[in-house]
Image: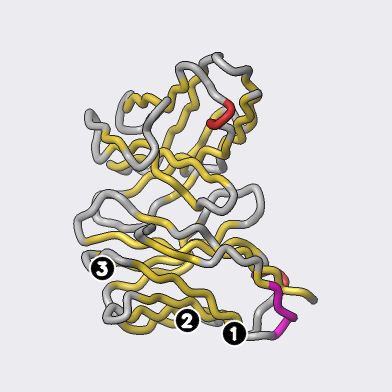
């Protein structure tokens, strides 16, 4: 079993839709939870990060962490064609040097 | 600042050939990483260097070697390339107090 599970998609939605992306994990030591966005033929870039449980909002993006269920989510409101990318969840433990990445979900937002 | 740079951007090798992928960062970061990315597999850690002078194996180290040349540079060497090493390779770095990793643009490697 992988430490982090993420549905690779692809996920196709119309412009303006609410998008929900999710990951599950097995290691209870993880404390930092991140979402990276990767455009085609580019390196990943950090989109949001959350420490421990709770919600964090940044514009159209909301990250949620439920440590009791070992489940994290990224919501995108009013999705735009420019949001079309691969979204990778990632997590690491306090003081840890290694970050574990999910497989990434490919998102297509159609105009 | 250039951030994380990687060379080359593209490379085609024949089975058995060797090559070195170069990575440099100008953010004074302590930790550096090499990943490979394959369809449906996400980013898999090959090797990492927590600080200058140290290197450790990641999830998929077989067939690779690394050198942390100095604080800025971290190279990845394929001694005898195999078709299974066809992939996109990313270098990343991270600061001492941070969790965010900064990625380079990647090297697309094909082994025939």
Binning the other alpha carbons within 10 Å of mark 3 as few (below 14), some (14 to 19) or many (20 upward) gives: some
Residue at the extreme front: A1
Labels 2 and 1 in the same subunit:
yes
Which subunit holds the residue at mark 2? Answer: A
Determine which residue is flagged by label 1.
A77
**Please, what secondary structure does the residue beneath circle 2 have?**
strand
Q: Which of marks 1 and 3 is in front?
A: 3
Which subunit holds the residue at mark 3? Answer: A
Labels 2 and 3 in the same subunit:
yes
**In the displayed structure image, the side of residue A30 where residue B87 appears, left or right:** right
Residue B36's spot in the image, x, y percent?
49, 41
Q: Is residue A85 magenta?
A: no
Determine which residue is flagged by label 2.
A62
Labels 1 and 3 in the same subunit:
yes
| Quadrant in which the C terminus of chain B appears | top right
Q: Residue B112 carries which label?
A: none
Q: How far apart are marks 1 and 3 (CA)?
A: 26 Å
Observer able to see residue B1 = no
Residue A81's spot in the image, x, y percent?
72, 72
Residue B45: quarter of image: top left
Determine which residue is flagged by label 3.
A31
Residue A3's spot in the image, x, y percent?
35, 59
Q: Distance between the residues labelled 2 and 1?
A: 8 Å
A92 w.r.t. B54: above or below: below
Helix, strand or loop for the magenta stretch, by majority: strand
Q: Does the magenta stretch include residue A15?
A: yes
A14 w.r.t. B37: above or below: below
Q: How far apart are marks 2 and 3 (CA)?
A: 18 Å
The residue segment tinted magenta is A12-16
Q: Are marks 2 and 1 in contact (CB under 8 Å)?
A: yes
Q: Which residue is drawn at 57% across and 63% down?
A: A8
Q: In terms of sequence position, does the residue under pointer 2 or pointer 3 come before the other?
A: 3
């Amino acid at each position: 079993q992988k430490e982090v599970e993420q549905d690779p998609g692809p996920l196709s939605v119309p412009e303006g839709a609410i998008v929900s992306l999710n990951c599950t994990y097995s290691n209870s030591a993880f404390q930092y939870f991140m979402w990276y966005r990767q455009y085609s033929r580019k390196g990943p870039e950090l989109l949001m990060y959350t420490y421990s449980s709770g919600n964090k909002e940044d514009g159209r993006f909301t990250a949620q962490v439920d440590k009791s269920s070992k489940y994290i989510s990224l919501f995108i409101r009013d999705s735009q064609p420019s949001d079309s990318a691969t979204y990778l969840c990632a997590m690491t433990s306090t003081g840890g040097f290694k970050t574990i990445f999910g497989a990434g979900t490919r998102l297509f937002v159609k105009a | 600042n250039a951030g994380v740079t990687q060379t080359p951007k593209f490379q085609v090798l024949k089975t058995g050939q060797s090559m070195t992928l170069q990575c440099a960062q100008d953010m004074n970061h302590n930790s550096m990483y090499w990943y490979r990315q394959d369809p449906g597999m996400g980013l898999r850690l090959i090797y990492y260097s927590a600080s200058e002078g140290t290197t450790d194996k990641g999830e998929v180290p077989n067939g690779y070697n690394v050198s942390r040349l100095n604080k800025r540079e971290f190279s990845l060497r394929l001694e005898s390339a195999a078709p299974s090493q066809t992939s996109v390779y990313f270098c990343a770095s991270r600061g001492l107090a941070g969790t965010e990793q900064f990625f380079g643009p990647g090297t697309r490697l094909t082994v025939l």
